Image (cartoon, grey):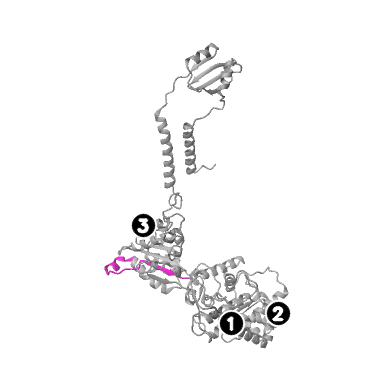
């Protein structure tokens, strides 16, 4: 039998004591009480045998059945009344006068007050496993690692420039006296800025691990409460905790939750979040010159932070942690591949080249999905084909192999994706074909994945060809079926967005010149536009966008008309094999018979693949999806 926890025993005992105390102070009414007039009538009728007088309370016993009841006289009983009762043969007993203890009336309220105080202190001091208690609203929720994290810079890859900039912080934490002697002021705050999953928290832990100092981690949402003043009190408690563990690092993740620009909240300066931010600013200013506390914060929304938070003396150093380049992706893959059995055909360098735009979290998830696929098929090693399927799952979702698709839908999808692929292959400035498939994934019935490299500049010719590739699927449907379907919805969005940005942002239209008609605030969570033109200009822009899209549509329709025989070959190959990689696609375009291609096969159970297939790159915008 399980015993009750001590907390429950304490609460049960307190409830019993409170009930007992109230029972002493309450006036209990007897259940057998009768009216005084009824008592007088029974005396006149001779039914009363005995009366016990206790002040105004009369305990009456009847003659017939010795039944007893209680009644109350309107005034104390005098001797004359007692003699009258004696004349009627009624036995009368007088109770001895009671002596009330004055201490009892004093101790009972005192007992109740003491009991309530004991309960209050019990809950305020009783801490659970997490160290929280019922009245610790103002205590910081930060996790304090008194021992330095085991993570170091060797466990962080893909951000070499950021590590070089943070090495100065490590040196300061290791030997602060050397910097103080020179009168140098080390930055109090370091703001890590980058897209989600790029490793901001990871590199902050690595700084603490390299410096071998305690790591105090909190989240911006930990300071946001509905109670007034709680957030500011938690900020004060956080910095008091840091001073007790100095030298140390304070890390606040998602600081934009508490550090947003002031003045936009309801109530103006009395907004609770703004008060919390004010307290954080005060604490940052309160650091002494010789302090050995470094506060690091991470965000993917630097555009919304309050300017006072970023001025010199506070978060005066910003370290950008962007998506890694091809060398960084290879290093990240090597780190996450530790402990995973890889087949001999796995080439991490080739995998890194084929995954532009992936951040550390994406690459880790890719390898994990590949490991799950290999384990699901009872294989002992991860093959390159597992990695390809994992990449498709990460980008588009799992394949819908059980989805019922009519033959007509398969043909429409095959012609649509073949149109995308042929436009990408034959247009000079378009990206080459990496993979084309009609296997449905996510919301797409099929997709053509282009092969792209890391690039920073997109030329006008490349952008116009990308628009043509996006419109090629609809053009193929028009050419073959003399009809259109709803499958080009996403293609139109991508093509229209590129065309509009070419005109309004990038100055690539001769009629509009080099004017920024639209300003896009790029953030790591996606951009948002600010319109800066009149209604007349908006009409001209709409006409220019429509004209540009029509030109590219006519261009790709003319191309597919000339290559109609190639379109048919690729479509038939897709209907038969469902998926073509880059090499197979080129061989079909060049007229090689489909029978000469190696048949598709599942990866072997106990041995590795011989030829590594290509990996789907992650890029934006993702042109070519059906």
Question: Can see residue 162?
Answer: yes
Q: Residues within 10 Å of mark 2 (few under 14, many from 20)?
A: few
Quadrant location, the N terminus: top right
Secondary element at image label 1: helix
What residue does disc 2 label? 483
Looking at the picture, tell me which residue is in the foreground, 87 or 373.
87
The residue positioned farthest toward the bottom in the image shown: 562
Side (left or right) of 59 relative to 259: right
Secondary element at image label 3: helix
Residue 440 % position (x, y): 65, 72
**Mark with earlier residue (1, 2):** 2
Question: Can see residue 576?
Answer: no
Looking at the picture, tell me which residue is in the foreground, 117 or 267.
267
**Mark with earlier residue (2, 3):** 3
What residue does disc 3 label? 240
**Residue appearing at x 41%, y 41% in the figure:** 117
What residue does disc 1 label? 543
**Mark with earlier residue (1, 3):** 3
């Amino acid at each position: 039998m399980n015993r009750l926890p001590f907390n429950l025993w304490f609460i049960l005992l307190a409830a019993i004591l409170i009930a007992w105390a109230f029972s002493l102070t309450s006036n209990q009414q007897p259940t057998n009480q009768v009216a005084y007039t009824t008592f007088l009538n029974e005396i006149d009728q001779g039914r009363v045998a005995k009366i016990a007088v206790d002040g105004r309370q009369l305990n009456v016993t009847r003659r017939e059945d010795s039944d007893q009841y209680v009644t109350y006289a309107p005034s104390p009983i005098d001797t004359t009344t007692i003699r009258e009762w004696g004349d009627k043969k009624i036995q009368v007993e007088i109770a001895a006068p009671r002596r009330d203890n004055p201490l009892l009336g004093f101790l009972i309220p005192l007992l109740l007050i003491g009991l309530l105080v004991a309960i209050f202190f019990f809950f305020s001091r009783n801490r659970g496993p997490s160290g929280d208690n019922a009245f610790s609203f103002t205590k910081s929720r930060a996790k304090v690692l008194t021992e330095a994290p085991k993570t170091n810079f060797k466990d962080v890859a893909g951000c070499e420039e950021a590590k070089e900039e943070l090495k100065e912080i490590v040196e300061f934490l290791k030997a602060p006296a050397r910097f103080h002697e020179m009168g140098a002021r080390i930055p109090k705050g370091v703001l890590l800025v980058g897209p989600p999953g790029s490793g901001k928290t990871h590199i902050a832990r690595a700084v603490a691990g390299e410096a071998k100092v305690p790591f105090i981690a909190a989240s911006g949402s930990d300071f946001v409460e509905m109670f007034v003043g709680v957030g500011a009190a938690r900020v004060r408690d956080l910095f008091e905790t840091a001073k007790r563990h100095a030298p140390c690092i304070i890390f606040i993740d998602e600081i934009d939750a508490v550090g947003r620009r002031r003045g936009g909240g309801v109530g103006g300066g009395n907004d609770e979040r703004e008060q919390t931010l004010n307290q954080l600013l005060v604490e940052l200013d309160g650091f002494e010159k010789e302090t050995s506390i470094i506060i690091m914060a991470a965000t993917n929304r630097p555009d919304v932070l309050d300017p006072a938070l970023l001025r010199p003396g506070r978060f005066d150093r910003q370290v950008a942690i962007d998506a890694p380049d091809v060398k960084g992706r290879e290093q990240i893959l090597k780190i996450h591949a530790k402990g995973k059995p890889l087949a001999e055909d796995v080439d991490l360098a080739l995998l890194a080249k084929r995954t532009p735009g992936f951040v550390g979290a994406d690459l880790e998830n890719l390898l994990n999905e590949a490991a799950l696929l290999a384990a699901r098929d009872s294989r002992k090693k991860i093959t390159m084909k597992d990695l390809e399927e994992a990449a498709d799952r990460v980008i588009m979702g799992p394949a819908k192999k059980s989805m019922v698709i009519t033959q007509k839908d398969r043909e429409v999808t095959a012609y649509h994706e073949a149109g995308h692929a042929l436009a990408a292959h034959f247009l000079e400035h378009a990206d080459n074909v990496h993979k084309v498939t009609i296997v449905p994934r996510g919301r797409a019935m099929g997709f053509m994945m282009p092969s792209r490299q890391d690039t920073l500049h997109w030329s006008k010719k490349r952008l116009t060809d990308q628009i043509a590739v996006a419109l090629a699927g609809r053009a193929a449907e028009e050419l073959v079926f003399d009809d259109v379907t709803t499958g080009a919805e996403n293609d139109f969005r991508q093509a229209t967005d590129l065309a509009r940005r070419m005109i309004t942002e990038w100055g690539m239209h001769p009629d509009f010149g080099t004017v920024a008609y639209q300003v896009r605030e790029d953030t790591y969570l996606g951009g948002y536009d600010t319109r800066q033109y009149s209604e007349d200009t908006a009409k001209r822009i709409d006409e220019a966008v429509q004209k540009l899209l029509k030109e590219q549509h006519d261009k790709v329709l003319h191309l597919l008309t000339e290559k109609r025989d190639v379109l048919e070959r690729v479509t038939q190959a897709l209907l038969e094999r469902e998926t073509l990689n880059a090499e197979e696609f080129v061989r079909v375009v060049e007229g090689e018979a489909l029978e000469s291609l190696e048949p598709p096969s599942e990866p072997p159970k106990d041995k590795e693949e011989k030829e590594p297939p290509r990996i789907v790159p992650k890029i934006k915008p993702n042109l070519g999806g059906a």
